[in-house]
Image (cartoon, grey):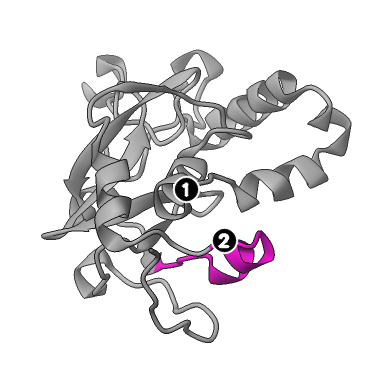
Amino acid sequence: MPYSEPVPFGLGQFVSAADLSPAVGDLIEIDRTLYAHWAVYVGDGRVVHVVGPNDEDIPTEWALIKKCPLIELAGCSGVRVNNKYVRAKERGMKPLDKEQIVQRAVEKLNQKVEYNFLTRNAEFYATQWRYGQGWSDQAAVALSVMKPLGADLEMGHNTLLTGLQAVFGSPILSYLRLPPRSPRTPQKRPNSLTAA
């Protein structure tokens, strides 16, 4: 039986992870500027989320389900609780009870899962754990903006990844560009740039 909780009016502002007071089972939205990374709060300051093999927020074909401290995951990014009440209500869904949410989030820790920026991203998995059915609103927006590519999801996925790599990679020379990493992980530069 789903638990009932008060439905807040509107969303709160993004704050530092240290200033957030989430409840177990809350969806945590992490503002990465060009996209949002998503996680589920499981208690004791920890969240469960999907991440690439090198801790990148946007992996290519698969991701791992990981548990980590929210402060570590957020890094310098703002966070907020966003339980997607309106979008869930539009779909006729209610949240599972807190114990079910946590169980669903942790049952496959450290296991590989399918990943696609447009269809099975961090938002998809977080909503799936909370509501029993996953979806991604930011992917829907991206697809509507990229309507010509919407018919070919793999092409859209690759186009978005290429664009994000261009934005997050080094602005110096294209051969020095690095894959997009989350703001919590420092990027290593070639020695020739740091030796000077």
Disc 1 marks a residue whose amino acid type is Gly
Disc 2 marks a residue whose amino acid type is Met
- Residue 117 locus on image (x, y percent): 57, 32
- Residue 168 locus on image (x, y percent): 49, 36
N-term mark: 1 or 2? 2
- Residue 119 locus on image (x, y percent): 61, 33
Check disc 2 and report its element: helix, strand or loop.
loop
| Label 1 to label 2: alpha-carbon separation | 9 Å
* Magenta stretch: includes residue 87: yes
Query: Which mark is drawn over residue 93?
Result: 2
Bounds of the magenta span? 81-93
| Residue 61 seen in the current view | yes
At 27% from the left and 30% from the top, the residue drawn is: 108
- Residue 107 locus on image (x, y percent): 25, 35
Q: Is residue 193 above or below residue 107?
A: above
Check disc 1 and report its element: helix, strand or loop.
loop
Name the one closer to the observer, 37 or 64: 64
Q: Quadrant of the N terminus?
A: bottom left
Tally of numbered discs: 2
At 30% from the left and 43% from the top, the residue drawn is: 105
| Residue 75 seen in the current view | no
Q: Look at mark 1 in the image and give the residue it sits on.
A: 132
* Magenta stretch: includes residue 99: no
Query: Which mark is drawn over residue 114?
Result: none
Name the one closer to the observer, 129 or 49: 129
Q: Quadrant of the C terminus?
A: top left
Q: Is residue 45 above or below residue 54?
A: below
